[in-house]
Amino acid sequence: MKGVPKMLGKKSERNDDPSAETRTESSRQVGGRRPVATARGGISLGGILTGVVVTFGALLLLTALVGGIFTTSDFNPTELGSTQEVGVGIGVGLVAAWFLSSMWGGYTAGRMGRGAGIVNGILVPLVVLIIGAIVAAIVGALGSSANLNLPFTPAQLPTQDSALYDLSAGFGIAILAAMAVGGAVGGGLGSRWHTKLERRVIAEEEGRIAETSAGGDGRNETLEMRGREDTPRPA
């Protein structure tokens, strides 16, 4: 029976300081903010696949714009046959369309991936080529054809009575380069969005901490001054 009071006494000593648990939780909260805010991810499969969808969607819109501009010219490609050599204007337009589309898709992957933005951005056009080849093979096996405007394949603008354009090898290489550069640039911009946001949040947190510290020091100085004034002086 003598051991019971000692055990109870130890338990009560543990619970005598209720602020201990609060301090622990508070330190986890304050110490956990910055590591969470600056956390980085790696390759994001979901971000890359979403970037692929964005790339194809943007390419459709941009090639339609290129086709609309091209149809306003005096040149009528339908009079030259279904397949023909594409002019310099169409080639440049398609290279620009692929660059902007890949940059848009790379930005999506870099922003969703939260880190490794350039890597995620470059992987977007690579997966675009893989998925495009798979889709074209499946459609071909079903007895039809699909034109996705991939490099080194005949291009077709999504406009009325649009013909097929045979891109030269030079334009095919240019499109590949535009896709890689656009994906890398977009991925870097998407990842940079997170770092800009984190810097602003960290700066706000540091400002709050500085204001709290300055306010606490000011209150302490005021209390000390009041204590000195209230202290009776010797006659």
Image (cartoon, rainbow, N blue to C red):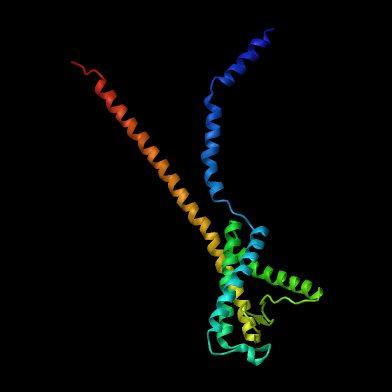
User: Residue most toward the bottom?
Assistant: 80
Viewer can see residue 15: yes
Residue displayed at 47% across by 49% down = 201
Residue displayed at 55% across by 33% down = 25
User: Residue most toward the top?
Assistant: 1
Pick the front one: 181 or 154: 154
Residue displayed at 59% across by 69% down = 58
Eyeballing the image, is 48 above or below 157? above
- Point out residue 56 in the picture as x, y percentages from the top left corner: 64, 69
- Point out residue 5 in the picture as x, y percentages from the top left corner: 64, 10
- Point out residue 222 in the picture as x, y percentages from the top left corner: 30, 30
- Point out residue 8 in the picture as x, y percentages from the top left corner: 63, 14
Pick the front one: 203 or 233: 203
Q: Quadrant of residue 28?
A: top right
Eyeballing the image, is 24 above or below 182? above
Q: Quadrant of residue 86?
A: bottom right
- Is 46 placed left or right of 202 in the picture? right
